[in-house]
């Protein structure tokens, strides 16, 4: 099983920046998109951003122009650069990626990293 480990979360003031990293313990399916999700207390998990192998990105409207997703296929790692952070960005951030097990594509999730933005 491939495990994903997120890092880079923390406490930051509104207007500040954080860079999240998501590192895989093994080979992931680079042909599949990688994604960053977040879940705030009392809310459903939502897709924040995704990126294909070729670098095509997709963002939820609320983060467009402020967040940038990227990936390093050679390192099996994805990143989320978050600028101009707002209190409403406070959430646990998760990444996901696909890997192959017994010729079956499976989705792996990380354990999450807390991002707290103070006003």
Image (cartoon, rainbow, N blue to C red):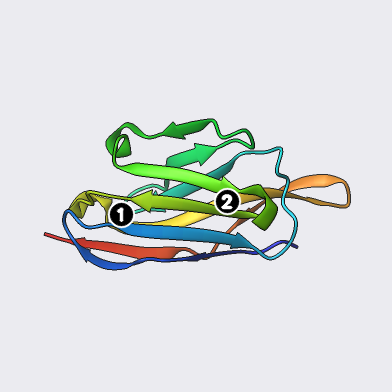
Label disc, if present, on residue 96 of the rendered structure: 2
The x, y position of residue 75, in whole percent, is 66, 57
The x, y position of residue 18, in whole percent, is 33, 59
Q: Would you say 31 lies left or right of 13 here?
A: right
Q: Is residue 75 above or below residue 9?
A: above
Label disc, if present, on residue 42 of the rendered structure: 1
Q: Could you say which quadrant of the image residue 30 lies in? A: top right
Q: Identify the residue at horizontal 29%, vertical 42% (top origin).
A: 66
Q: Secondary structure at mark 2?
A: strand
| 103 or 21, nearer to the observer | 21
Label disc, if present, on residue 60 of the rendered structure: none
Q: Could you say which quadrant of the image residue 93 lies in? A: bottom left
Q: Identify the residue at horizontal 61%, vertical 39% (top origin).
A: 33
Q: Secondary structure at mark 1?
A: loop
| 94 or 10, nearer to the observer | 10
- Binning the other alpha carbons within 10 Å of mark 1 as few (below 14), some (14 to 19) or many (20 upward) gives few
Given this view, does label 1 or label 2 mark the residue nearer the observer? 2
The x, y position of residue 7, in whole percent, is 46, 67
Q: Would you say 26 lies left or right of 58 here?
A: right
Q: Identify the residue at horizontal 39%, vertical 58% (top origin).
A: 19
Which quadrant is home to the C terminus? bottom left
Which sits earlier in the primary sequence, circle 1 or circle 2? 1
Q: Residue furthest left?
A: 119
Q: Identify the residue at horizontal 71%, vertical 38% (top origin).
A: 31
Q: Would you say 110 lies left or right of 105 here?
A: left
The x, y position of residue 42, in whole percent, is 30, 54
Q: Residue furthest right?
A: 102
- Binning the other alpha carbons within 10 Å of mark 2 as few (below 14), some (14 to 19) or many (20 upward) gives many
Q: Could you say which quadrant of the image residue 10 lies in? A: bottom left
């Amino acid at each position: 099983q491939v495990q994903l480990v997120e890092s880079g979360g923390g406490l930051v003031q509104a207007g500040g920046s954080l860079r999240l990293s998501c590192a895989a313990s093994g080979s992931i399916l680079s042909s599949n998109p990688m994604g960053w999700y977040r879940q705030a207390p009392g809310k459903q998990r939502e897709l924040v951003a995704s990126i294909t192998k070729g670098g095509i990105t997709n963002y939820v409207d609320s983060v467009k122009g402020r967040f940038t997703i990227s990936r390093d296929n050679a390192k099996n790692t994805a990143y989320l650069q978050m600028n101009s952070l707002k209190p409403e960005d406070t959430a646990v951030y998760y990444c996901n990626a696909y890997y192959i097990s017994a010729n079956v594509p499976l989705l792996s999730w990380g354990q999450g990293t807390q991002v707290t933005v103070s006003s």
